[in-house]
Amino acid sequence: MIRGKKRVWGFDEQERALLFEATAALPELRALVERAEPRPELGKVWVVTTTVDELDAMYDLVEALTDATRSRKRLDLLDGLRASLCTSMDGF
């Protein structure tokens, strides 16, 4: 059950794959990724309704992954995720 202020957050196929891998040992964050539904009318985008607290926890994970990453491609994906998380948390 989602409690608190709800927000919508979306991510693409590559970001979803990265998040799915990164949340393997984090069941609460994995559940967030698994709740996302594909939205073909928006392109290859997955969308989930979630709380600011859950988005904040995902943001913390993305920050930790960024700190541990050297790959330019992966850093670009993580930067995109960080930006989309900020936008969703702010409610835009």
Image: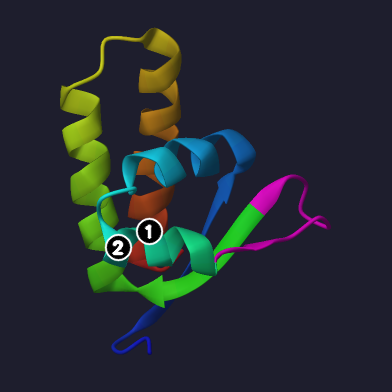
Which quadrant would residue 22 be assigned to in this image? top left
Q: Is residue 73 visible?
A: yes
Q: For this view, does 45 lie left or right of residue 41? A: left
On the image, the x and y values in percent for residue 46 come to 62, 55
Q: Report how far apart the C-alphas of labels 2 and 1 lie in the structure.
A: 5 Å
| Residue labelled with disc 1 | 30
Q: Nearer the viewer, residue 36 or 9?
A: 36
Q: Amino acid at mark 1?
A: Arg
Residue 27: give its label: 2
Q: Is residue 55 visible?
A: no
Q: For this view, does 81 lie left or right of residue 48? A: left
Q: Is 65 drawn above or below residue 84 in the view shown? A: above
* Few, some or many residues within 10 Å of mark 2 (<14, 14–19, 20+): few
Q: Main secondary structure of the magenta part?
A: loop
Secondary structure type for disc 2 = helix
On the image, the x and y values in percent for residue 2 come to 37, 86
Tags 2 and 1 in contact by the CB under 8 Å rule?
Answer: yes
Q: For this view, does 67 lie left or right of residue 58? A: left
Residue 68: give its label: none
Q: Amino acid at mark 2?
A: Pro
Q: How many marks?
A: 2
Which residue is at a point 25% across and 18% down the rendered structure image? 69
**Residue extent of the magenta highlight:** 36-45
Name the image quarter holding the N terminus. bottom left
Q: Nearer the viewer, residue 73 or 83?
A: 73
Which quadrant would residue 75 be assigned to in this image? top left
